[in-house]
Image (cartoon, grey):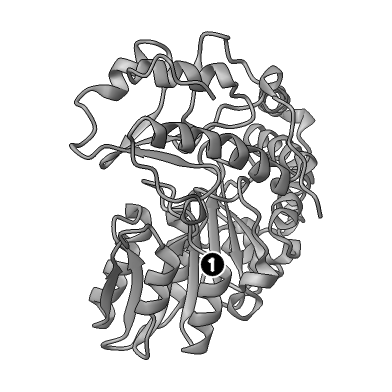
Amino acid sequence: MTNTILKNQRHLFDMPDDIAYLNCAYMSPLMTPAVDAAGQGIQYKVQPWTYGGSSFFTYTEQLRALAAKMINTKSDNVALVPSASYGIQVAANNISLSRGGEILVLKDQFPSHIYPWREKAKACGGKMVTVERRENGDWTKAVLDAVGARTEIVALPATHWADGGYLDVEIIGKAARDVDAKLVLDLTQSLGAMPFDVQAVQPDFMVAAGYKWLMGPYTLAYLYVAPEWQDGVPLEHNWMNRKGSEDFSRLVDYQDAFQPGARRFDMGEKSNPAQVMAACTSLQQLLDWGVENISHTLGARNARVANTARQLGLHVTEDNFRSPHYVALQYKEGVPDGLAEKLAAQNIFVSVRGNAVRITPHLYNTDTDIERLFAGLGYARARI
């Protein structure tokens, strides 16, 4: 299938022309239609008599269906949770670890995908194994070389949050299954910007926070739970995840049974209409654009950014080892002090992570934004 280069979508965002926001990996802006949908949801709280009991389930099921479509699975396999850390803790609580068993993670992995596993290893007498960066940036090969007979849990992202390093989770998933290890993925920094197919990768658990590349509100995330784990223990026991909770008149007929599928892992108060309706609008727009097209469009722009940076003497990971929606500009002597603040004073917004300036544009960015970035970095003649 041929992917399409998408047109610039800045008109869908409240983004003045003098703002060069190149920081989607930090937090995406909400699209204007999502803001409008959130306003409609807030109106339900302004006039709660208009928010019928069935509404507690209608909008969340719409959101669940959209999230499921994003990863090519059934709605029954998706739970609505407040954060990536919540979803990872669900996984950690349900996957067993033997004494001496190994949990595989990356060097400098995001803390929310480290702390639950450290506690798990401590409680079970297991061992954390940290995969080191390769000189050429090939995370996939580094992980494959680290998977072994003692590996019981492989807990990874598909895109390294600091430098955009790419991991082929389909290949890694097969390697994990070959040693009977469980695969737990945090796709916060890739879902919505890179295609992901549950059927191909076959993770045991996968979670993604919704406020970055999924362009939704804060405090909402999506947790995939493979069918074989759906009899597990949820992190909390709330009224909505029990069987029959749609009937408000019988809530005190307490139930041992849960709602079907992964719904038992849903967070409490998941039915915030402003949040859910905004997220539905955002996911639907991403699906309308097509994640493959988004990835292709961002990848084409960022390839030009990377080539320009290399010509200027900055180091950028080879394109085949870099996620297409990320460019990390690395300095031999370290990122100059105060660089992010200096750029922000010029309305150019990036993140500094470790020894890299993290550049993460989206469909709202223009060539002028990128040229302003290089000018702000001291390369006034750079052209994209």
Residue at (37%, 91%) from the top-left corner?
Answer: 149
Residue 74 position within the rendered picture, expressed as x and y whole percent measured from the top left = 76, 65
Q: Is residue 176 above or below residue 162?
A: below
User: Is residue 345 something that shows in the picture?
Assistant: yes
Q: Residue at x 70, y 47 (%)?
A: 291
Residue at 28% from the left image edge and 74% from the top image edge: 129
Apparent side of residue 34 relative to residue 119 in the rendered image (left or right): right
Judge by depth and name the residue closer to the eye, 323 or 206: 323
What residue type is disc 1 on? Val
Image coordinates of residue 311 in percent, x first then y, are 40, 33
Q: Check the picture and name the quadrant holding the C terminus.
A: top right
Answer yes or no: is residue 215 visible: no
Give the total number of marks visible in the rendering. 1
| The quadrant where residue 347 appears | top left
Answer few, some or many: residues within 10 Å of disc 1's Cα (few below 14, many 20 plus, some between 14 and 19): many
Residue at point 29%, 16% (across, down): 342
Residue 188 x, y percent position in the rendering: 51, 50
Where residue 45 sits, quadrant-wise, is top right
Farthest residue, direction front = 311
Q: Is residue 345 left or right of residue 214?
A: left
Q: Position of residue 274 (x, y in %)?
A: 65, 31
Give 119 or 260, whichever is nearer the viewer: 119
**Height in image: 169 above or below 100?**
above
Q: Which residue is mark 1?
A: 169
